[in-house]
Image (spheres, rainbow, N blue to C red):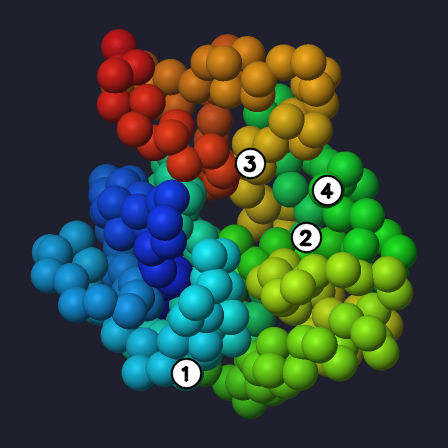
Amino acid sequence: MDRGYMWFALNNSTTDYIALSKILATSIKKFNTHNKVCIVTNEPIEDELFDYVKILKTDDSAGQEWKLSNEYKAFGLSPFTHTIKLEADMIFTQTTDWWWNQLWQHDQVFSYHCRNYKDKLIEQSYYRKLFARNNLPDVYNGLHYFRKSMKAKQFYDICKIITKQWSTVKEMVLVNCHDEQPTTDVVYALANKMQDPLQLDKVDYAWFKFMHNKLHINEIDSSFDNDNYLNPLKVNDTLYIGGYRQDRVVHYYNKDIAKDLDVRIF
């Protein structure tokens, strides 16, 4: 079975997503036997950590600081028959080899909701008021499986239309949306709703969710700094956040955490 992980890594003025990608790829290969990775970027890279490097022929996010406008191209750019799409600022904490036995049975599987550092399921996120106003499915693009199928292609075709026609979509389709450019989570959620309005094809695995390291998701008071308060650290290969061992894929969000963890290994 031709399978692997892919994500987009386009640097901006504040974040080196290639460096973050190396950390993510290292964690995937450390814990998994099935560990091929593909990154999509806009500059040539030679690193044995990456099995495939796809260079964008056209960068739809050129001139944008938050480079999200290319992510509808995931289906066409993936070199794998079976793909798990991620985000660069993530890290694996244990093997996920067994996931494929479940995922390959479907055309696509979305990650609904997320978990906080205590592994509590977060269904109504503080950060997703736009989702609530528009009754959008609570999906996250940072963990999405698809196989090369007509259904998955249709989904990404819808994502392309939403992205390309964003000014019309935010005015005519979404209620009270003020995003100047499309965010991938909103694009995914709207495409999901258009493709499956009654959610009859919904596949929601309890294990196919990541830990999202954001202040309000972690239910921490705004007077505290999320990462100083929870003090993420590693003991050998085990990641702890707020004293809780992390067994899921972790979306650490704060890009400095990856660097800080290098000096917090005991």
Q: For the point 81% across and 48% down, which residue is it? A: 129
Type of amino acid under label 3? Met
Say whether residue 86 is visible.
yes
Q: Which mark is residue 76?
A: 1
N-term mark: 2 or 1: 1
- Which numbered mark, 4 or 2, is in the foreground of this view? 4
N-term mark: 3 or 2: 2
Q: Mark 1 packing: few (<14 Cα in 10 Å), some, or many (20+)?
A: few
Q: Which mark is residue 127?
A: 4
Q: For the point 52% across and 54% down, which residue is it? A: 142
Camera-side residue: 231 or 110? 231
Which element carries disc 2, helix, strand or loop?
Answer: strand
Type of amino acid under label 1? Gly
Cα–Cα span, label 2 and label 1:
24 Å
Q: Which residue is mark 2?
A: 112
- Which numbered mark, 4 or 3, is in the foreground of this view? 4
Type of amino acid under label 4? Tyr
Type of amino acid under label 2? Tyr
Say whether residue 71 is visible.
no
**Residue 257 vertical placement versus 204 (above, below):** above
Q: Which mark is residue 249?
A: none
N-term mark: 3 or 1: 1
Camera-side residue: 236 or 33? 236
Cα–Cα span, label 4 and label 2:
15 Å
